[in-house]
Amino acid sequence: MSNDKGLQDAHIKIGTKQTMKVVESGLAAEVYVAEDCDQRLISKVVSECDKNGVHINYVPTMTELGEACGIEVGAAMVAVLKS
């Protein structure tokens, strides 16, 4: 990912449940989704983002997304909060 430091500095919510809550409540500016996570999860968040007009960025792996967020485990998805 090109903006690793940007995700660490941004106000984010990490994980599927947290991301879905933020997107549904209209507080997400954009969402990052790991392409190697469960396809059912991806389809749910894509549908919710489309409904709420939230831009989705895809990252190749959950490990890469976790590292970009500054955590030591993988992350399926991350929501960047509106400022």
Image (cartoon, helix red, strand yellow):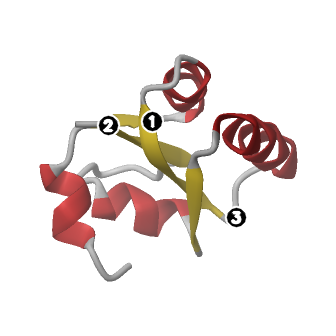
Inter-mark Cα distance, 2 to 3: 26 Å
Question: Total of numbered circles in the picture?
Answer: 3
* Residue type (three-letter) at the residue carrying disc 1: Ala
39 left or right, relative to 29: right
Residue placed at 59% from the left, 75% from the top? 60
Q: Tell me whether the residue at label 2 lies in contact with that at label 1, contact meaning CB atoms closer than 8 angstroms.
A: yes
Percent position (x, y) of residue 61? 57, 69
- Amino acid type of the residue tagged 3 in the rendering: Asp
Foreground: 82 or 12?
Answer: 82
- Could you tell whether 20 is left or right of 71 in the image? right
| Residue ID for mark 1 | 28
Q: Secondary structure at mark 3?
A: loop
Question: Residue 79 occupies which quadrant of the picture?
Answer: top left
Identify which residue is drawn at 67% across, 42% down.
49
Residue ID at (22%, 38%):
11
Secondary structure state at the residue bearing disc 2: loop
* Residue 16: image location, x then y, percent: 59, 33
The 10 Å Cα crowd at callout 1, few under 14, some 14 to 19, many 20 or more, is many
The Cα atoms of the two marked residues, 2 and 1, are separated by: 6 Å
Query: What type is the residue that disc 2 sits on?
Result: Lys
Q: Quadrant of residue 3?
A: bottom left
The mark closer to the camera, 3 or 1, is: 1
Report the residue marked by disc 2.
82
Q: Earlier in the sequence, mark 2 or mark 1?
A: 1
Quadrant where the N terminus is found in the figure = bottom left
Contact between marks 3 and 1 (CB within 8 A): the answer is: no
Q: Position of residue 15 (x, y in %)?
A: 50, 35
| C-alpha span from label 3 to label 1 | 22 Å
Between disc 2 and disc 3, whose residue precedes?
3
Q: Which residue corresponds to mark 3?
A: 36
